[in-house]
Amino acid sequence: MKTFRSRSGEVLRRKAFTLVELLVVIAIIAILLSLLLPAVQQARAAARRSSCKNNLKQLGLAFHNYHAAHNTLPPGYVAGITSPGRDPDTYDAAPGWGWGTMLLPYLERNTIYDQIDLDAAIWTNSHADAIRTKISLFLCPSVSGGDDEFVILDAAGNSLVIGGQNLTVGRSHYVMSHGQESCWGECGSALTNTIFTSIQPFTTTVITGVNGDVSRIADGPFYRNSKTRFRDFTDGTSNSILGGEHSSKLSDKTWVGVVPGGFVHPRFLTPENGPDAAATLTLVHMGPSGGELDITGYPIIHPVNFPTFHVGQMYAEHSGGGQILMGDGSVRFMSQNIDLYLAAHLSSIREGEVIGEF
Amino acid sequence: MKECEFRLTLCLLLFLIGCGYPQVGPATYEYAKALYAVCNQQDLVRLKNCRQDIEQLKQTQEIADREANYLLAIIRDAEQGAWTQSMEECRKLMEDQIIRK
């Protein structure tokens, strides 16, 4: 603090800071803030990641409770594939309810579940309020793409009209695993599909006359009309993925189910991604899938955050990877740089692969 | 400084310090994807095959020189044992092709 001397010789002390003193104080505060802010941001991100992980853990418990009650996991989604109203390409049909709806009683969401008639189609008028409910347990706080309800789109990206109306559904940031293989957009009667029976070494087999029976192709726990039991996890429940994350930053997913004629559109485009069939509203796959080969002829495996950014893959906004739910109910962090074959092995439930550490 | 001048300067600066890959052709993108898997598996045989393919495509101008050089630089790093760095470069090349709607 600066001192002055008056004309009478009296020493005066000015009650103010000099500019230099102020600048020094501001600089110190700026340095402290620059040290503190990243730490605060990291703590907030860690809290969000923890909450996100906890939701997935709750879903794992609900799956186990469902299995205890029904002796099977819930279906990926339910569709009467022989009904006349089925989608001619995919064979998706009413009622369409997905794994998320089936879990509601085991997530203490009975009030919503009681408003739903599982025998009636999702798009029945009486379901309109229930299916647009925002359920926090299906929402990951780390996601920046939004957590509000959304309108299901058609192939062209317009609002799908079904039952004479548009359909608004509640969002989920979690998706379940179809395994390595996918079968959704093309899974009708005429399909002849080459599936990978092994990826080390690469061996394939040709499946003909699928007739909408996805169980002949899927090698994961959830698919259309699946009834997977824990005893079917011959690779071991701790070595098999049930599901994981899919941020709405990439595309819209729902806990409700699958609507025939619906399409999932990516929110950002890459040279490779594009709209995919309705099953990807609730399900994803890890690859390789029949026909998915890279330019050198090798199968494409796309673990969490793989940079092709398909709507049918896992995608999380955590630094370096995403959370995955294992069959034993544990939640693990999968690095986006995980060994590709290991990721593929983890996504199938009964192919007898040797699983390494991850 | 006018806004457009400021933006131009910023773009020039970003270009000079090498922030990101520009838009590349379909073949380059496909090879980046294949190289990602090759580096992930640390597969020297496939890496060699990729190098031969890319050099040939460069010669026949099916991949532009500049784009081929991106891929060959990634391959060079991988050949020197920097597999993770090469994988990250492939990821970066692919991520830089994202088009926001």
Image (cartoon, helix red, strand yellow):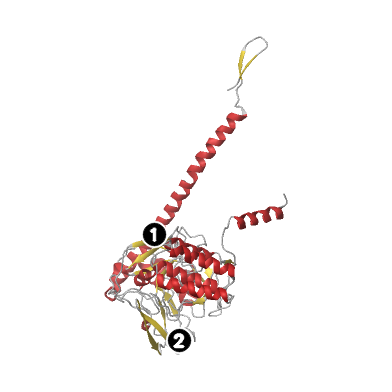
Q: Three-letter amino acid code at disc 2?
A: Gly
At 48% from the left edge and 49% from the top edge, which residue is drawn? A41
Residue A202 coordinates in the image, percent (x, y)? 37, 79
Numbered disc 2: what chain? A
- Locate the C terminus of chain A by quadrant: bottom left
Instruction: Assess whether mark 2 and mark 1 are in contact (beta carbons under 8 angstroms).
Output: no
Residue B20 coordinates in the image, percent (x, y)? 56, 60
Give a yes or no on whether discs 1 and 2 share a subunit: yes
Closest to the observer, B44 or A43: B44
- Locate the N terminus of chain A by quadrant: top right
Q: Quadrant of residue B40?
A: bottom left
Tag 1 residue: A53
Numbered disc 1: what chain? A
The CA span between labels 1 and 2 is 36 Å
Tag 2 residue: A188
Q: Residue furthest top?
A: A8
Left or right: B7 with respect to A309?
A: right
Which of the marked residues, 1 or 2, is nearer the chain's N terminus? 1
Label 2: how many Cα within 10 Å (few below 14, some 14–19, many 20+)? many
Closest to the observer, A146 or A250: A250
The kind of secondary structure element at disc 1 is helix
Q: Three-letter amino acid code at disc 1?
A: Lys
Residue A252 coordinates in the image, percent (x, y)? 50, 69
Would residue A149 be visible to someone looking at this image? no
Would residue B9 be visible to someone looking at this image? yes
Closest to the observer, A338 or A211: A338
